[in-house]
Image (cartoon, rainbow, N blue to C red):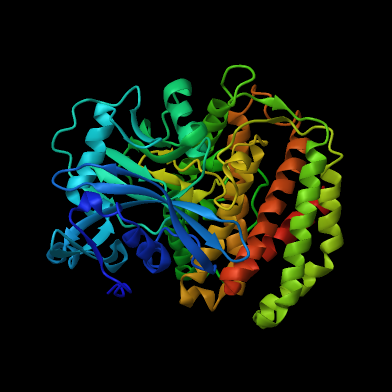
Amino acid sequence: MAPAPQRPLRASSWGALFAGPDNVRILESSELAAWLRRTRWFGGKASTIESCRIDDRVYLPAGELGAWLGIIRVKYRGKHAENYAVLLGWCPNVDADAMPDATRVTPAVVDGVPGYIVDALYLPTFRDALFHYLVEGREFALGDLVVRFLPGRTLAQEHEGLQARVLNAEQSNSAVVYGDRYLAKLYRKVEYGVNPDLEVTRYLTEQAGFAHIPAYRGAVEMLGPEGKTLVLAMFQDWVPNQGDAWSLTLRSLAGYYQSVQDKELAQQPAPEYPEHLDNFESMPELYRELIGADYFGLVDKLAARTAGLHRAMASGKEGGAFTADPQEEGQLEAFSQATHELMRSRFEMLRSLLDILKDEIRLEAEELLRLEPEVDRIFSALARDPGPGKLTRIHGDYHLGQVLFTGEDFVVLDFEGEPDKPHSERRRKYSPLKDVAGMVRSFHYAVHAAILQHPEWAEHSEALNPWATAWYRMIATRFLDQYLEGMLGTELLPADRAATMRLLRAFILEKAVYELGYELNNRPEWVAIPLQGIRHIVRSYAAS
């Protein structure tokens, strides 16, 4: 149960709850911080909260009661403040008791009736109202604040009988599904200015006509003083699916490893395989049997969708946000310098945490630390590369978990970019190969994650590793070859394959070095995955 407030909140009506300063003071001084820490979407759980302040709020009517849409300014000790969007409703105790603890903010007596302030998304009347407001294009104001519901060009007007439910996935946003037809993504951590997720989704839907995303259907934004804008929500199509490509890949790998075990192949050397595969039949017979034509074909399809996405994101009018720009002088040097700093910080972290690693992982880590000059050389050489290609808008956080599998095809999700970066940086243009690097690293993670998630296989990981390497190199190379074929004629990539591979390897190396820090902070038992990835790239550079 949520802890009782120092002083109970009281109001003559729900709409008047914030009319007096006392209720606001109690919420800000004690209740909001405690509630935020219980939610799934709050990103500051590991930081010390110094204060929470309700900066802006607008009342949204719905049924007998409505909800307050508020922006909470969270200040931390030792890091930048953040803005979080909240929807606060009220219901009597009998209804609140049936809700998850994380949805209840604090007890409040309204018009003499005991109840709770709750996350309004869990009130059916309010969920329904949100969609009606979008269809009607409603606006709500309080003082100089305006909340606008903006229907997209292609939003259907027939919407009666759509049952709304909250998705309970662990994520940084909240989501409501309307009748398995639409999805409302409510952004929790919000930032003034252009939201890249909405910007890209709307462009791909309404301008580029790219069909392999959940189509854009509308948005909710708050206009504040001096024309400042906060994007609060985006409405999209709901895509029926069989999970994401990460889950699909893990299932395929589980079958692969199980077959290796059943056929008693783990104690044998993994057969050789060609560097490139022209088609499924060019794969050695044993691998064809172990991997299967279905997954091989889906890799081809994923590569085609990725190339189509990058073509679409570079198809805008000249000089706009979605055109390909030439690499400007100094940009590669700036990237090289940034990767230097990333490498130094991650390797220093690795040195300081060697003692927490298991013996076999520590030996790998010590070997990698001896290769630091080689990693440094690779990033330095990148600044002098004469053929970097062009820069476009990209996904920015592309991996198998960002792609839904419909049962026959793939749909790309979430164009928010890296969550720890500001919107301005997420909207920068990069080489499309940065996305490709993310997907290649995701394949590498999958081959090892599938082993780590099965204790009976993890005990024999040394024997399975050659088979893991064979799967990864064939699948990742096939993905890359098909992607490059899909990009022919675009002039977005370097002029020749050798220059493309140099740039791609640098992006893969950057991604693996970033992952090294993540795993050291969160999953030390998985540190071996980025360690192996970094060593593989260093060896690839040496060979080339």
Q: Residue at x 17, y 44 (%)?
A: 163
Q: Residue at x 44, y 42 (%)?
A: 413
Res 532 quadrant in image: bottom right
Q: Nearer the viewer, residue 168 or 66?
A: 66
Q: Position of residue 226 (x, y in %)?
A: 51, 33
Q: Quadrant of the N terminus?
A: bottom left
Decide: is 152 above or below 17. above
Q: Residue at x 74, y 61 (%)?
A: 535
Res 385 quadrant in image: top right
Q: Position of residue 10 (x, y in %)?
A: 23, 63
Residue 33 shows in the view? no
Give left or right: position of 291 versus 215. right
Q: Residue at x 24, y 51 (%)?
A: 16
Q: Position of residue 244 (x, y in %)?
A: 41, 50
Decide: is 493 above or below 451. above
Q: Position of residue 329 (x, y in %)?
A: 83, 31
Residue 288 shows in the view? yes
All told, the count of numbered labels is 0
Q: Nearer the viewer, residue 524 or 330?
A: 330
Q: Nearer the viewer, residue 135 or 248?
A: 135
